[in-house]
Image: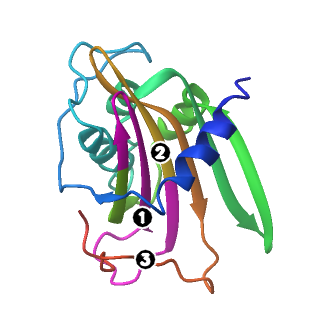
């Protein structure tokens, strides 16, 4: 268990209020690797890594997420925190990236489409933190999102490229709107 990650999450989110930059629209094709080892051709920017995250999580009905691309962008020691509500009560989960990706490897009967509508990036040297508002849909043509969440993503630039050290996603309550900043609902970046 890596206990240093929570202070990193807390420190990185404090910087968003005073020093943020909108992420450029980007996407990249990242080569797959069979495990969570660092690939020789990782994304050259933090923006590309985050774009790969949203693209790889999204999938058509009856298809699994693109786990090979996800394996490439997660650091071998990465951790994933998830905050949701069950019966109105907050629930926090913590998994290794390997455990998280195992759950993504199975085909699901419904589609899942992630739409990043408002990202903010803070970067210094080999450190980057992204605050991202994402809408999720089971029908990619649906006007309204099934749910909206905020994400905190911490990245490290290894010699081969950018990898995710930590992902913290928080699914908001339906009656608690999420500020989209300059983003617009349904307009994916």
Residue at image coords 63%, 47%: 10
Residue lying farthest bottom? 175
Q: Is residue 180 above or below residue 53?
A: below
Q: Is residue 56 above or below residue 138?
A: above
Q: Is residue 142 above or below residue 120?
A: below
* Quarter location, residue 132: bottom left
- Mark 3 or 2, which is nearer the eye? 2
Q: Tell me if residue 144 is in the magenta stretch.
A: yes
Residue 21 at x, y = what percent?
Answer: 30, 58
Count of all numbered marks drawn on residues in the image: 3
C-alpha gap between disc 2 and disc 1: 12 Å
Q: Earlier in the sequence, mark 2 or mark 1?
A: 1
Between 132 and 34, the residue placed more toward the observer is: 132
> Which element carries disc 3, helix, strand or loop?
loop
Q: Which mark is residue 153?
A: 2
Q: Earlier in the sequence, mark 3 or mark 2?
A: 3
Residue at image coords 42%, 34%: 155
- Mark 2 or 1, which is nearer the eye? 2
For disc 1, the marked residue is 134
Residue at image coords 43%, 76%: 145
For disc 3, the marked residue is 145
39 sits left or right of 172 in the view:
left
Q: Is the magenta stretch mostly helix, strand or loop?
A: strand
Magenta segment, which residues? 122-151
Between 91 and 50, the residue placed more toward the observer is: 50
Q: Tell me if residue 64 is in the magenta stretch.
A: no
Between 3 and 186, the residue placed more toward the observer is: 3
C-alpha gap between disc 3 and disc 1: 9 Å
- Mark 3 or 1, which is nearer the eye? 1
């Amino acid at each position: 268990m890596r206990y240093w990650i929570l202070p990193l999450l807390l420190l990185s989110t404090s910087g968003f209020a005073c020093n943020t930059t909108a992420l450029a629209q980007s996407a990249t094709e990242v080569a797959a690797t069979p495990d969570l080892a660092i690939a020789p051709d990782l994304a050259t920017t933090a923006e590309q890594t985050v774009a790969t995250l949203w693209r790889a999580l999204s999938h058509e009905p009856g298809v699994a997420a693109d786990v090979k691309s996800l394996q490439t962008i997660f650091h071998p020691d990465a951790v994933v925190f998830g905050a949701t509500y069950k019966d109105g009560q907050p629930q926090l989960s913590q998994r290794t990236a390997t455990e998280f990706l195992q759950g993504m490897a199975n085909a699901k009967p419904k589609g899942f489409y992630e739409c990043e509508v408002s990202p903010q990036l803070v970067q210094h040297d080999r450190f980057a933190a992204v605050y991202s508002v994402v809408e999720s849909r089971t029908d990619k043509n649906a006007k309204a999102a099934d749910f909206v969440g905020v994400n905190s993503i911490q990245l490290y630039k290894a010699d081969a490229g950018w990898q995710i050290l930590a992902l913290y996603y928080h699914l908001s309550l339906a009656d608690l709107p999420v500020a989209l900043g300059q983003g617009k609902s349904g307009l994916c970046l």
